[in-house]
Image: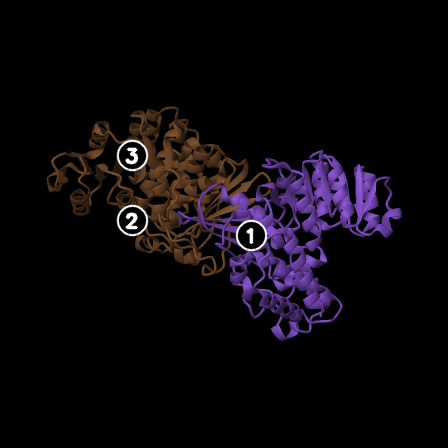
Chain colours: A brown, B purple
Amino acid sequence: MIVILGSTGSIGVNTLQIASRFDIKIEALVAGNNVDLLNKQIAAYKPKFVAIGSCQDRHKVDHTKVFCGEDGIIELLSLCQSQIIVNALVGYAGLRPTLESIKLGKKVALANKESLVVAGHLLDISCITPIDSEHFGLWYLLNHRPFNKLYITASGGAFRDWELDKIEKASFADALKHPTWSMGDKITIDSATMTNKLFELLEAKWLFDTNNIDAVIEKKSIVHALAEFRDGSTTAHIANVDMKLPIAFALKGEISEEILKPIDILGMGTIEFLPIKSDRYPIWQIKDHLLNNPHLGVVVNAANEEAITAFKNNHCSFFGMSDIVLKAYKYFENVQPQTIEDIVQINNEVRKYVKS
Amino acid sequence: MIVILGSTGSIGVNTLQIASRFDIKIEALVAGNNVDLLNKQIAAYKPKFVAIGSCQDRHKVDHTKVFCGEDGIIELLSLCQSQIIVNALVGYAGLRPTLESIKLGKKVALANKESLVVAGHLLDISCITPIDSEHFGLWYLLNHRPFNKLYITASGGAFRDWELDKIEKASFADALKHPTWSMGDKITIDSATMTNKLFELLEAKWLFDTNNIDAVIEKKSIVHALAEFRDGSTTAHIANVDMKLPIAFALKGEISEEILKPIDILGMGTIEFLPIKSDRYPIWQIKDHLLNNPHLGVVVNAANEEAITAFKNNHCSFFGMSDIVLKAYKYFENVQPQTIEDIVQINNEVRKYVKS
């Protein structure tokens, strides 16, 4: 039995498919504003509890136990018996449910990487299983062998092959054209700016307890992760572009049946790994500093969420988003959040700073 | 403490380096006819026993306990206390020492793949650890997970980029120009004909108890093996071209210190996997039949060893070698060796047939 936070997004929909396949019951569904899809999911999966983002939509939901808003999710969690909470909420909004789930002694199957980005140093990592292709790949490769360094790969996002001066004029819609993955808007923009990969490095830092981690571009999104072991061996995780694999492992542990069709190694053509450069991805300038000062993740995340809103509303250009984040990062570089309350306060301050 | 059979070859020399590094004593050294190098090794490693290929060379060896010939190796083995025998002899000559070592209850670190090719169905696999990059790579990747299929890679050998009609006129010296590995003559010729990879498939069949195994060309010899798991993940083993890695693991089990420098993934350029085609590698025609009839390995091996001698002596062309092997394979396809004595007899018959 599981709870799915973010059931109408891409991860949520895939999670429901995996749950059906393995006869896992759905105790509760939490969605944002896609009430039509939520109602279909309610009809199909018959959850005991439901929550929706806005209390104004409550009457549209075909269920007798509907919670709403942030507090509604927390109340819903406290009523659930499930041992696994799938957190596929988008952005900072995912943090409180992650904290609450851990407090309740649940295992969190975490697609909301922002939870780790903003508060990794305050979370009990042993309760968290990541739903992310790259971190799943690393886990699959490690097998308790001592490693030197871990690599995750990036597709390079929508503008990887654009001329730099063209990118400056790119629209929000342009940035949503991801070359290999079909995902939600926020993560797709984060892929175009490389912020998503920066977040995944932080995520990996907490999950695998190392700073020896880097990202490289692999344009086909076939190789998801590489592990460089101490003996001199390097291994790579290769799989088709589909979140069902990490989701299935997060729900079931080791799996010995087919979740995806395997890659056709003779049909996949050439593979190469390329460096991520700061001229195309300005956010990459702070990579090393951020890995050494991971408590600044809350600053990057808050500024980034506000920057995306600004870009979406035509208040800044594509590269303007990175400018916003880098400026906020510089401005707040001396903050030292020690508690969740500090995180919440800094998050608010950064957003206020960016908006002004 | 270990015994090294074939100490003056490439594997032998690397094994001595690894033994020095890990303070492993050398109980006995067995060489073919490179007496000069053997004498240097005796001075450096002070083995208790020594054996040499030809009894006529015995007096040239700087040691008081020198055995000679095939029987000499067997006698030497019976006197040794070592629990690990490294068998890096070349070709069919390696079989008897492998059998004897297993009979004596030793662990065999086996670089002599022909032992498995000719008599895999009669050997106790639990006593064997392969010294072969591809099989080491597979072992490194598997970690007890259920797999669908295993792949090993081939460089393609000396003529992989030659025009087919030029290959027909190629000399023995041409065929020794391996593009990526520096190895002994026999295995380098076997790489050019793809016989080496055919043998490694048989080796993998016995070691991993599967027929779901294939080979693909990877020209850089950086990726050595791939494992396609049941869940849909594929993993790859990537390492620099150096036998010290499989040797170190064969001698020490799991290792958590640097044996090789890791691959620079940003510097390695493009990687691709290509099919092995029978027009360039005629021996590949019998791959599936041989994997389904692995007891015919003795036929392929005997014919191949004779064919290499014929090619070396200008008695046949490069493709003539494959003709010889394929003709012998057809002629002997109904043999059913049940015992080692059958193997010995068939080996002799095939050689007589090829010579006539």
Q: Is residue B127 visible?
A: yes
Q: In the rendered structure, find residue B223 and report the number of the disc placed on it.
A: 1
Establish if B255 lies above or below A157: above
Q: Pointer 2: what residue? A: A312
Q: Is residue B197 visible?
A: no
Residue A226 percent location from the top left of the image: 50, 45
State the SS at label 2. helix
Q: Nearer the viewer, mark 2 or mark 1?
A: 1
Which residue is pictured at 29% across the width and 34% down the height? Answer: A85
- Residue at image mark 3: A85
Near mark 2 (Cα within 10 A), the count class, few <14, some 14-19 or many ≥20, is some
The reply to the same-chain question for discs 1 and 3 is no
Decide if residue B149 is on the left or right side of residue B319: left
Q: Residue B193, relative to residue B143: is it above or below?
A: below
Residue type highlighted by circle 2: Lys
Chain containing mark 1: B
Identified at 35% across, 47% down, the residue is A243
Question: Which residue is situated farthest in the right direction here?
Answer: B59
Which quadrant, please, contains the C terminus of chain B?
A: bottom right
Q: Circle 3 sits in a helix, a strand or a loop, which is it?
A: strand
Quick one: label 1, few (<14), some, or many (20+) residues within 10 Å? many
Of residue B58 and residue B22, the one placed in the foreground of this image is B58
Badge 2 sits on which subunit? A
How crowded pointer 3 is (Cα within 10 Å; few <14, some 14-19, many 20+) is rated as many
Q: Which mark is residue A291?
A: none
**Left or right of residue B175: residue B203:** left
**Which residue type carries mark 3?**
Ile
